Image (cartoon, rainbow, N blue to C red):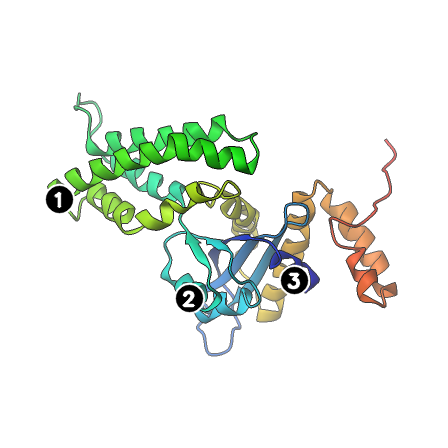
Amino acid sequence: MRIRKHQHSGSLIMADETRIQVLKEPNYSPTSDKWMWVTLGGPPDKQSVLFDYDPSRAQSVPVRLLDGFNDGYLQTDAYAGYNDVCRKNNLTQLGCWDHARRKFIEAQKALPRGKKIKTTKADMALSFINKLYKIEREIKDLTANQKLTARQEKSVPMLNKLKKWLEINKPRTVKDSLTGVAMTYLHNQWKKLNVYCTDGRLRISNILAENAIRPFAMGRRAWLFADTPAGANASAVHYSLIETAKLHGLEPYQYLNAVFKALPYAQTVDDIEKLLPWNIDLPVEQS
């Protein structure tokens, strides 16, 4: 796919995956989990969202999807299925602070209500993390170089304080408690969670990939399942085109209508390139 080739020419790809039920997948039961994978990335002016169906969640799937993407950054949650492709393609793994924050929020919400409780460890962790996000909101309109400078001056000292706090309090926390689980996640992911401070082009979280996959997850509530692998693959193609069009400010129906009309007459690679969302010249709709 031409869009995937462009996606691999960028420096950062964000990835996520969600369940899909496919009834007639050979060698799988109808009720077993299969997976829709999504990747978001590419050069700033040619970014894309790509969906890909696979019945497996094995490490071989990211290796296939990211074949040709080398020496860049890969941002995901903590799923170990991405480790193999990072080793093979020399990718720097980038953590997601949203996932770390959610675990402390879960611990915070689990506390008994209606009682006056002193500040908890979950409260303290969230205080540190929220300050990191506040910095990101303040620098969101800066250039990549300016963001890097600001993170080195403001975020890194805050991260050092959080690390010191974690080292002191983690041994004092029940390991199997929600707060203990959140601390273990933070400790195990610490190196990956700090990578965003080394390059101003990077983001503090993987939220863009999660947002990209959300329309598929919401649609799944209505249509429930795919009948065959061919149907799941067709869904992946259509969601890829629609979400990439939206990423470039195009109205999806108008874009797809133009592509389907022009595609039968496309005979060369250049003809295909002209139909990509960042190249296509759509007619101005009459109001």
Q: Position of residue 116 (x, y in %)?
A: 17, 20
How far separated are the C-alphas under marks 3 and 2? 20 Å
User: What is the spatial separation of the Cα atoms under label 1 and label 3, in whole angstroms?
Assistant: 47 Å
Residue 8 position (above or below residue 55): above
The quadrant of the picture occupied by the N terminus is: bottom right
Residue at (18%, 44%) from the top-left corner? 177
Q: Amino acid at mark 1?
A: Pro
- Between 72 and 260, the residue placed more toward the observer is 72
In the rendered image, residue 134, in percent from the top left (x then y), is placed at 42, 27
Between the C-alphas of marks 2 and 1, the distance is 31 Å
Tell me the quadrant of the picture where the C terminus can be found: top right
Q: Which x, y percent locates residue 174? A: 13, 44
Relative placement, left or right, of 6 versus 86 is: right
Residue displayed at 80% across by 51% down: 257
Q: How many marks?
A: 3
* Mark 2 surroundings: few (<14), some (14-19) or many (≥20) residues within 10 A: few
Element on which disc 2 rests: helix
Q: Is 194 left, or right, of 256 in this rendering?
A: left
Q: Name the residue rendered at 29%, 38% in the picture.
A: 104
- Residue at x-position 37% and y-position 50%: 192
- Disc 2 marks a residue whose amino acid type is Arg
Q: Mark 3 sits on what residue?
A: 5
- Dot 2 corresponds to which residue? 87
Identified by mark 3, the residue type is Lys
Is residue 55 visible to us here?
Answer: no
